[in-house]
Amino acid sequence: MPTRTTPRREAAVLDARTRLRFGPARLTSETGVPARTISRILTRHQIPPLAWLDPVTGTSIRASRSTANRYERERPGELVHIDVKKIGRIPDGGGWRLHGRAAVTNDRKNPVGFDYVHAAVDDHTRLAYAEIHPDEKGITAAGFLTRAAAYFQRHGIERIERVISDNAFAYRKSAAFSAAVAALGATQKFIKPHCPWQNGKVERFNRTLANEWAYRQPFTSNTERADALAPWIEHYNTGRIHSSHGLTPAARVSPT
């Protein structure tokens, strides 16, 4: 075919996909190839969708769900998804991602421990907010929700009507968290057990957060990575085009 993309450009697209693990819309800015052409190239080379890949390693994984129906709430604040992502802390000087597994010893007497990244995502706009905490207790989750609501309000989402989460103890059994939801004038909802896709907006955000912030580069300390979270959230909300609606989340809140 005379109009077929040259092998050199196809190779550039495939290299960018392997290296960045972006979808066609975002690969366009990296390669200069139109998104529709990128989709055809990926299909021609049998490259699996990002949803079929492990977010860290890029290897294929299997996933299943009970329904393929996609939904989106009609207005900002109608439904906010919340979740906690657990990530390993980074020792001073860097961990195995910087030095390699062979160079890092596992000190069981002084474990590095974990950070708990609390996240909230608005269903309609995908506006997101996240904080790092040392635990996932109910009182911690309650404080996070209150600050997330204030963040959303500053960005144009005046009121949160519903909050949906999985069935973790901090959400279902904590009086502090229930009180925080009530103080917002919101209704608390839970996903059906073993159906994480019902909280899919924040689950997908967690995967993006891992790919583009937590494991995007080798950090030399836990503080360095923590300091990079707020700038990345700002980029996610105001500079990164979301593939679901073709706008940044902040622009979706106020399209004009």
Image: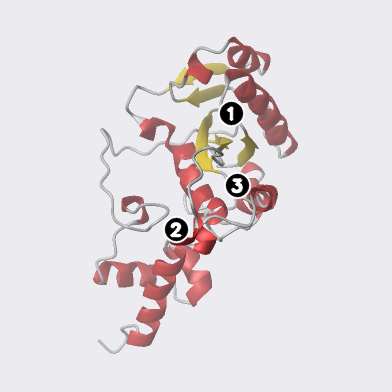
- x%, y% of residue 38? 38, 70
Closer-to-camera residue (229/28): 229
How crowded pointer 3 is (Cα within 10 Å; few <14, some 14-19, many 20+) is rated as: many
Q: Image height check: is 2 above or below 228?
A: below
Dot 3: what SS? helix
Residue, disc 3:
249
Q: Image height check: is 149 above or below 175?
A: below
Q: Image height check: is 193 above or below 253?
A: above
Q: Is residue 197 at least partly visible in the picture?
A: yes
Position of the N terminus by quadrant:
bottom left
Q: How is the image coloured?
A: secondary structure
Query: Comparing marks 1 and 2, which lies closer to the viewer?
Result: 2
* Amino acid under disc 3: Pro
How crowded pointer 1 is (Cα within 10 Å; few <14, some 14-19, many 20+) is rated as: some
Closer-to-camera residue (161/104): 104
- x%, y% of residue 133? 63, 33
- x%, y% of residue 244? 47, 49
Instruction: Give the residue furthest to the right.
Output: 154
Q: Quadrant of residue 48?
A: bottom left
Q: Quadrant of residue 131?
A: top right
Closer-to-camera residue (228/152): 228
Residue, disc 2:
101
How crowded pointer 2 is (Cα within 10 Å; few <14, some 14-19, many 20+) is rated as: few
- Horizontal relation, residue 236 to residue 211: left or right: right
Q: Residue at x 51, y 44 (%)?
A: 107
Q: Image height check: is 32 above or below 177?
A: below
Residue, disc 1:
135
The tag earlier along the polypeptide, 1 or 2, is 2
Q: Residue at x 25, y 71 (%)?
A: 44
* Amino acid under disc 2: Arg
